[in-house]
Amino acid sequence: MNYCSNCGAETLNNAIVCIKCGCSIIDQNLHHKKPKSYGKAIFIGIIIGIILIPLFFIFTTSIITYNILSRRDNYQETSDSSIDYTDSYLQYATFSLIGQVNTRTRDRLHSVVVDMLIEYDNNNSSLTELMGRVDQLRDFTRQFFSNKYHDELRPENEENIKLEIIEYLNTRFLNSARVHGIIFNRLDVIEL
């Protein structure tokens, strides 16, 4: 089959004139035959793509994996040098046997509920002293908070309260044990 170069209509192989537009197609028959099929070229392109895309993916994945593993080795080398520092870091023990203490504020208009932990040097003599004075520590906690007004126990004053307790325990209360921190598991001030 041939095609008319003027309108693109299909014509017979021996046709002299296009039936649709009337244009002469004798010269066209020599030059214009059925359009070329690109099916073979597309098939070859698909085959090459099927082979090259996985190879590219494998190559890229290998390079990324290598870079990640080499970085991890560098991090391990730098983290190993900090072992000496972490071993020398002081760690404190936590004393939690005081338990929950309930009292009222100095103005008697609020109730205070306190559950306080003490951070101390991690040694036997400090633990022995704290264990031997549990009842006195409970009484101290009760007395400390009952001497405070509601306004002094606001959340924004919590750090000052902790510092005041640490100073009092270290200078006036404990003999050999040293307190390094106070943690409030609970510090509630409730209006009555």
Image (spheres, rainbow, N blue to C red):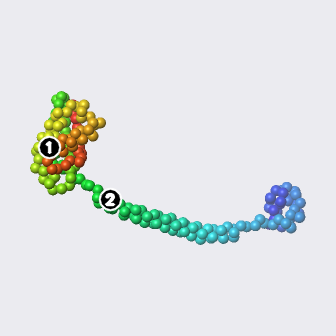
For residue 154, what is the image quadrant?
top left
Sequence-earlier tag: 2 or 1: 2
Residue 108 seen:
yes
Instruction: Name the mark on residue 124.
Output: none
Can you identify the residue that label 2 sits on?
85
Amino acid identity at mark 2: Tyr
> Which residue is identified by label 1?
173
The residue lying at 60 percent from left, 69 percent from top is 52
- Taking the image as shown, residue 11 lies to the left or right of residue 184, namely right
For residue 165, which quarter of the picture? top left
Q: Is residue 83 above or below residue 98?
A: below
**Which quarter shows the N terminus?**
bottom right
Q: Residue at x 62, y 70 (%)?
A: 47
Quarter assignment of residue 28: bottom right
Q: Is residue 26 left or right of residue 101?
A: right
Query: Residue at 80% of width from left, 59% of height from top?
Result: 9
